[in-house]
Amino acid sequence: MSDTHTTLILNRIDTLRAAMRREGIDALVVPSADPHLSEYLPSHWKGREWLSGFTGSVGTFIATQDFAGVWTDGRYFTQAETELAGTSVHLMKIPSGASLLYIDWLAANMKPGQTVAVDGAVLGLAIARQLQSALDAKDVKLRTAGDLLNAVWPDRPSLPDAPLFEHQPPHATRTRASKLAELRAGMVQQGATHHVISTLDDVAYLFNLRGADVNYNPIFLAHALVDAQSATLFVLEGKVPADVAAALAKDGVRLAPYADAHAALSALPADAVLLLDPRRITFGTRQAVPSGVKVVEAINPTTFAKSKKNDDEAAHVRATMEQDGAALCEFFAWLEKTLADTKRAPLTEVDIDHHVTAARARRPGFVSPSFGTIAGFRSNGAIMHYRATEEACATIEGDGLLLIDSGGQYVGGTTDITRVTAVGKIGPEHRRDFTLVLKGMMALSMATFPRGTRSPMLDAIARAPIWADGIDYGHGTGHGVGYFMNVHEGPQVISPSMMPEPHTAMEPGMITSIEPGIYRPGKWGIRIENLVLNVPAKATEFGEYLRFETLTLCPIDTRCIEPSLLYPHEVKWLNDYHATVRERLRPHVSGEALAWLEERTQPL
């Protein structure tokens, strides 16, 4: 990084330490979080990034008077090493499945009587309990009141003010009233009279509303409090258009200022029974609940409800996948033609981002990308969450593999796809790795499993063909995907770092990614990703079984395959998939895009 950047970070940390001394704080923890525990944050809550210079979406910053460090996992090691270089901020590497390792560090390094501070408004309740327990055992005080960033961040961004809007039929297939009724039935099952929701995708789902407060995810800042007769939506003033406010009122939804959510919890009657999800609420929100109010802790009913897409939603997603696949045909046809033109100006990874987004933007129903495009050529493909910039990007020329992970938000669904394409000549080692990844993706895509299987248990199916060659990858195999909602959605996740708890059970209607990979630092990265839908497979005397319907429609580059490594049933799956892709996308493309589709879906 530049000398100016490192000097800026050093100065910010010096200012922070001075404020810590004034406040009697021995260690400050700054998590990557907001009051809604979001994955992607509004700029107002990007304090960890502002203090450290590390821009990855996952990480925890800790500062003492003589130490500063960022804890993050293997997806970001290379990125963090680059961004933290020269800043005096240490990269603290988190092994898979050890996301709270920084708590152990605090317990080991803090002395009795010292004070650890963290803004309770953005500290997850479940994490707060573990942190409190670890510090209590060492006689270290935990301070959660106040946000020290306000004292040291002079140009801190304000809260986003983009207006929200309704997700309309036919793409909104369930009415707001029906969702509220379903939620209230879930509350009754839990014996609750009230329910507080803070996770933004749950709020957006429940009220059939969308917004633009967070990059890539069509959500908005809000809390909700629901009882048996009414619901209150706590949202920033001026964000709700008059017609939307009127529609909400018809369904018994009252609007209140965003800042009043904690006060409303504090005013709950003594006989209230409050349902809350300890993994989806902050410590500060929990603290607002009066001590006399009975609390029931369970997963948000809306988290289960939105994960299970109904038949109409699934139909819209299938149609969206056709539009997304057609956009990718146009993009890849352009890419291969451009790369073949020796007289052209060199392409960069940033050009890839611009052109794939432009191709999607020409498709009906497109709203925005669903995450920042990852376009990594050669060694950059080995950086799992790589993001090219105008200042630092590779030129795509010569020989190698180009990894492109991209997606779109459409009114009829959310897409997420990774493809790897050959540029110039590639060798047998490229083909071997590519084929192993493809075998892993196909193995899980072809799986049949009992309904209710805990999703983390499926991870090994995709890894087995890769493990067989003594290779592994440092990320999960799959994540849930929303319906014109967050590209990363729970409760299901296919990952060895997650516990196979009851709430991770696979149910019909869930959409999940399958995305194994192989990454060779300094050489290349390969990931092949499709989205799949849980659908019924069969019913036997042993119970109901599910299988995956592949939703994503885009050719897989057969030029990168080593056919001798494939079994006949794998060749059949790939040929059948390409036949489906060709049939479904052909009506949506023409000219060079159609010619590219025909060529790239020829059977092995």
Image (cartoon, rainbow, N blue to C red):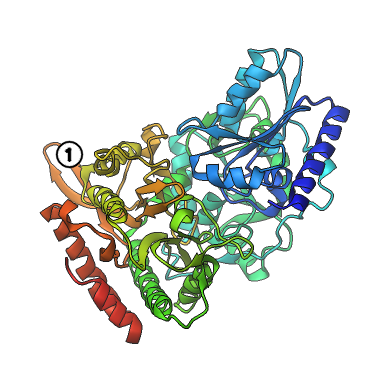
Q: Tell which of 581 and 282 is nearer to you.
A: 581
Q: Is residue 459 left or right of residue 486?
A: left
Is residue 437 positioned above or below 572 on the image?
above
Q: Tell which of 374 and 107 is nearer to you.
A: 374
Residue 34 visible somewhere in the drawing: no
Placement of the C terminus among the 4 image quadrants = bottom left
Q: Tell which of 9 and 119 is nearer to you.
A: 9
Determine which residue is flagged by label 1.
543
Counting from the top left corner in percent of width and height, residue 7 is at: 79, 46
Counting from the top left corner in percent of width and height, residue 367 is at: 52, 70
The answer to which image quadrant residue 585 occupies is bottom left
Counting from the top left corner in percent of width and height, residue 420 is at: 37, 61
Dot 1 surroundings within 10 Å: few (below 14), some, or many (20 or more)?
A: few
Find numbered disc 1 in the image and state the secondary structure of the residue it sits on.
strand
Counting from the top left corner in percent of width and height, residue 209 is at: 55, 61
The answer to which image quadrant residue 139 occupies is top right
The amino acid type of the residue labelled 1 equals Gly
| Residue at x-position 36% and y-position 33% | 500
Q: Hey, which residue is sitting farthest bottom in the picture?
A: 591
Is residue 47 positioned above or below 414 on the image?
above
